[in-house]
Amino acid sequence: MIERTPGPLVLLIEDEPQIRRFLRASLPTHGYRLVEAESGQEGLSAAAVERPDLVLLDLGLPDTEGLEVIRKLREWTHVPILVLTARGQERDKIAVLDAGADDYLTKPFGVGELMARMRVALRRTSRSDGARPTVTAGPVTVDLAAHRVWLDGKEIKLSVLEFKLLAELARHAGKVLTHGHLLMAVWGPDYLDQTHYLRVYMGHLRHKLEAEPAQPRFLLTEPGVGYRLECGD
């Protein structure tokens, strides 16, 4: 039985005792409540019963693949899913994001980075729940309804495709969007292998919106995977 203290409820689906001990000690000190599950089936049952605010999911579970757990969760819930994985290959990262995960961390990871990723995921859910049409990232404000963008209060003119790309990132602010996701959303299914389009248009956006385009602060690249609009932390 877990102690019910104020704070978001996190479901940890992880079979490694060391990771569970580490997070059991770390999360409550940062204001989170914790429920633990050691297998995919146990985790799916706990998600249905406990209705957590966020799921931390290991990919290498003893009874089922983490990808299958993500797919089953996405059949009925939009709860943020943050994957914890020892698999560092790009294809694995792309697979979890395309399956419906919100983000991933490669083991070993530090508690500071984990807390930052959790805060971003929870904020993104809060924005979605409120159906807010305006997203702010640093000095940039994106009005999704009006199709307008401001930098430090001054309106910036974007092309149609530049705005579509920025808007898709803003709708999922804080989440890594794969190359395939962005190409489908902005250009359509006939352009899924045209990743150079993304490099060109992200370059345009960074030159218009970032103070130092070569060292972007919020229009971030996830190498080999995709892009993220970072709104804080």
Image (tube, rainbow, N blue to C red):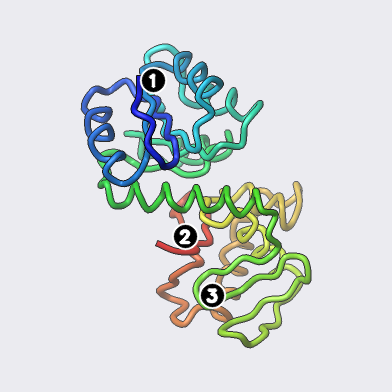
Whether residue 155 is situated above or below residue 7 in the rendered picture? below
Circles 3 and 1, Cβ within 8 Å, touching? The answer is no
Amino acid at circle 2: Thr
Foreground residue among 202 and 195: 202
Residue located at (51% from left, 66% from top): 219
Measured as percent of width and height from the top left, residue 121 is found at 49, 48
The residue indicated by pointer 1 is 37
Measure the alpha-carbon separation of dots 3 and 1.
42 Å
Q: Is residue 90 left or right of residue 189?
A: left
- Mark pair 2, 3: CA separation: 11 Å
Please, what is the three-letter code of the amino acid marked with disc 1?
Ala
Q: Residue furthest bottom?
A: 154
Q: Is residue 201 above or below residue 9?
A: below
* Residue 78 x/y as whole percent: 61, 37
Among the two numbered marks 3 and 1 on one chain, the one whose residue lies closer to the N terminus: 1
Percent across and percent down for residue 66 are 46, 25
Dividing the image into 4 quarters, which one contains the C terminus? bottom left
Examine the rendering and report whether any part of residue 119 can be seen: yes
Q: Which quarter of the picture shows residue 215?
A: bottom left
The N terminus lies in quadrant: top left
Residue under numbered circle 2? 221
Dot 2 lies on which element?
strand
Residue hosting label 3: 206
Earlier along the polypeptide chain: callout 2 or callout 3?
A: 3
Q: Quadrant of residue 48?
A: top right
Assign a secondary structure to mark 3: helix
